[in-house]
Image (cartoon, helix red, strand yellow):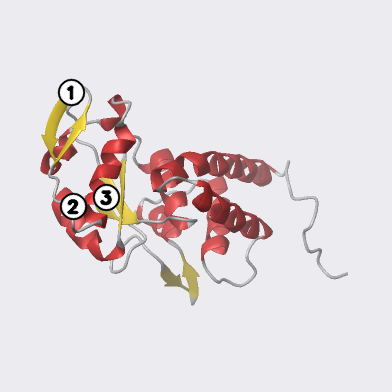
Amino acid sequence: MATVSLESLGAFDFTQSANGFVVERAVTERYSDPQRHEDTVYIDNPVKENRMKWVTREKAKVDRIACPWLIKKFVDKNPEFLFAPPETIPQVVKDTGATAYDAKGVELTHYKENGEERVSFDAIIKKYRLTDSALLELAKIVRGADAKIPNPPPESAGLEAVAHGFRNLAKDDFDNMRLQFPTYDALYKYCQLKAEGTQKLEYNVAQPAP
């Protein structure tokens, strides 16, 4: 067992520890509760490695779960995710050097394009110049589940519904990621098949007027 200061957490690879998420929760809880003054956490067998940190608002539902999936799959293969109360995010960024997303006043958040709202998932795709056709199709679904847009894809309502369910089933945001990531894997595969012309929705889809 090793003792480390919160300030040095960035030097460790928590994926090597069976208690990895526990460490990340300890960081989140410190910012969530100003009455907590603990400045050390315990981890097993720390392994030094510089990992990129990403922080967003706690109590995630759609966009703030979709973005970690996107980051891990297409942007950063070994990310460290943090969740914090909205008002503490600037301080978390200052303390940890994390990249903030889906938060007020940051680059990777909702924006307007041609008068229509785009979500943080879109902002990350744009920032990192991702052009995968299935991913762009998935972005439409995420957008429709997290923003008011004209003619959202029918899949968006289903995604929003399951996101509500998972948020209430999950123990915390890290558990929510664990539960929801397979949903995004499945939706991404569906979008790949849709792009190939071999898959489409068969039921409960509004048909165009004759």
- Residue at image position (19%, 26%) is 46
Task: Label 3, secondary structure: give it.
Answer: helix
Residue 92 placed where, x, y %? 20, 55
- Which image quarter is the C terminus in? bottom right
Instruction: Say if 3 sits above or below 67 in the image.
Output: above
Q: In this view, does 3 lie to the left or right of 73?
A: left
Q: Are marks 3 and 1 in contact (CB under 8 Å)?
A: no
Residue extending farthest right = 210
Please indicate, yes or no, whether residue 78 appears anywhere in the rendered image. no
Q: Residues within 10 Å of mark 2 (few under 14, many from 20)?
A: few
Q: Name the residue under label 3.
A: 29
Q: Are marks 2 and 3 in contact (CB under 8 Å)?
A: yes
> Toward the viewer: 164 or 185?
164
Q: Name the residue under label 1.
A: 1
C-alpha separation, residue under disc 3 versus residue under disc 1: 21 Å
Residue 130 placed where, x, y %? 43, 49
Which amino acid, mark 3?
A: Glu
Q: How crowded is mark 3: few (under 14 residues within 10 Å), some or many (20 or more)?
A: some
